[in-house]
Amino acid sequence: MDSAQSTPSPPSPPPPRRPASPQLTTTLDEKFDAFRIDRVDPISSHSILLSGGGEHISGTKTEQYVQELLKDPRNRLGLSALSSNDPAVVLKNPSAIINDTQYFNVAIPHEGSPVTYQRASGRCWIFAACNVFRIAIQQKYDIKNFELSQAYLFFWDKVEKANYFLESILDTVDEDVDSRLVAALMEKPVGDGGQWDMIVNLVSKYGILPQSLYPDSWNAQNSRSRGGMDALLTTKLRESALRLRALHSTSRNSTLLALKEKTMQDIIRILTLCLGPPPAANAPFTWHFHDTSHKLHTLTTTPLAFATSTTTPLLQKSISLVNDPRNPYLRLLTVSHLGNIRSGRPVTYINVSAPVLKSACIRMLQKGLPVFFGSDSHHQFDRVTGIMDTDLIDYELGFSVTLGMSKAERLMSGESKMTHAMVLTAVHLDGEGKAVRWRVENSWGEDAGEGGYFVMADRWMDEFCYQAIVDPEVVGQEVRDVLGQRAMVLPLWDPMGALA
């Protein structure tokens, strides 16, 4: 640590202070703040914990500081509450829970049902995409409850990612095995996560089909279990990657291809035994279903034909907007070595400001269209109440710490990245047409949030929403023109390379 850096002096125990007597005009936030622990004094040049010119921590001084902290009865109260409970529960702000209600004045006319559940897997992006696709299918065939097979796309994504990984290993044989790029490739060769452009690739090549014809297996629902399917696939691919690198300089191309062929056979065998054999993309299937009048219908088609008849406009027209304040706006971005289908549609983003991204989402909802979006669900996000609000958990109240990083700083420091994909189905606008809160369809089952739906405060969207998939018609020409640019290439380990 820089010796010039200093730490705050311990605060003198403040005189006892009673909360102000509640008045009829006192807001809930004011009542909550009445119990706030005083902030630590501003940083001074006087060191109270450090020794040796600021390089070391003094155990004796630390003990004295702790004793001084606990002279304050409010810190002792904090110790009692926070040491025996989850701080995120203790410090939950009741006003955020009251204000973030499930009432909206702009909503799509038809939400998909039932609420989906990805269970112990990282398939949120597949679930979110299928939840978007199914709405048109339910309307077309007049169905009340319907799910697409998430496991079908999951199977083929694993197959394609394995091939993509092995080809990337061959592309990088001249890199040191401990280089940052090779290390990033090796970290998650076939992780569960993905991006919108990967969904486009999968549906374009393999199509879609109803879940009843290829339901989840145990391994689809528990893909990340210790020693389970993902772990086995990862081990096998890492082993083969090292073998390919070792053989590259001394062996013929046919030898490398033979090893790759053998590896892919192993991967497909594992997937088939764990997930079940999937229908072929061009093989006919017969689907029986009841409409809302309980009339039985039968449809015979193929996965590819089914996709063409229900998803083609969305797949062909959709564009991916991101809000990355580290990089210039109105700039096309891509990520090196990120994808699933070799020579498929590359992962690309149009970087725009938060207001532009939100305006596009509002216009999508006003047109009656759901919005696939990517965000960071690790911050100010409560699974039980289904609330996403930057004011939800008051860490300053409990710990007297100020957390003031900007969105760009969180990205730069590794504090935040895209971790979860969901679907927007409604928004509440104020009198000036500005968003107040958003309705979010999640894929964590009916017990999460309010019947599976969450409320996202607009301020949370500003800070932790990174991506939205929209129709080009809802953005201006200056945004559409960005698609003609040569993309700025970000490294694989960049936060924009995170897979939701």
Image: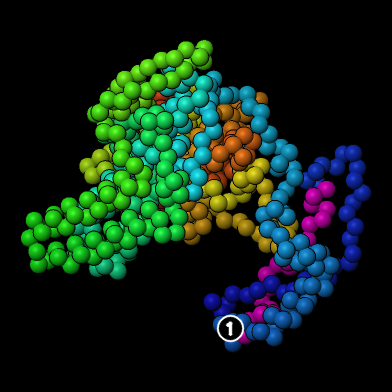
Main structural element of the magenta stretch: helix, strand or loop?
loop
Q: Position of residue 446 (x, y in %)?
A: 59, 36
Q: Nearer the viewer, residue 413 or 500?
A: 500
Segment colored magenta: 31-51
Above or below residue 247? Residue 125 is above
| Residue at 38% from the left image edge and 54% from the top image edge | 230
Q: Residue beneath label 1, please?
A: 56
Q: Position of residue 92 (x, y in %)?
A: 71, 50
| Residue at 50% from the left image edge and 45% from the top image edge | 119
Quadrant in the picture for residue 235? bottom left
Above or below residue 106? Residue 89 is below
| Residue at 52% from the left image edge and 12% from the top image edge | 293
Q: How many marks?
A: 1
Q: Is residue 327 visible?
A: no
Q: Position of residue 148 (x, y in %)?
A: 42, 31
Amino acid type, label 1:
His
Label 1 Cα crowd, 10 Å radius (few <14 / some 14-19 / many 20+): few
Q: What is the secondary structure assignment of the residue under circle 1?
A: strand
Question: In this image, 219 relative to 2: left or right?
Answer: left
Quadrant in the picture for residue 236? bottom left
Question: In this image, 465 relative to 7: left or right?
Answer: left
Question: In this image, 82 relative to 258: left or right?
Answer: right
Is residue 280 magenta-colored? no
Q: Position of residue 314 (x, y in %)?
A: 37, 27
Tell me the quarter of the image containing the N terminus.
bottom right
Above or below residue 486? Residue 181 is below
Q: Is residue 18 visible?
A: yes
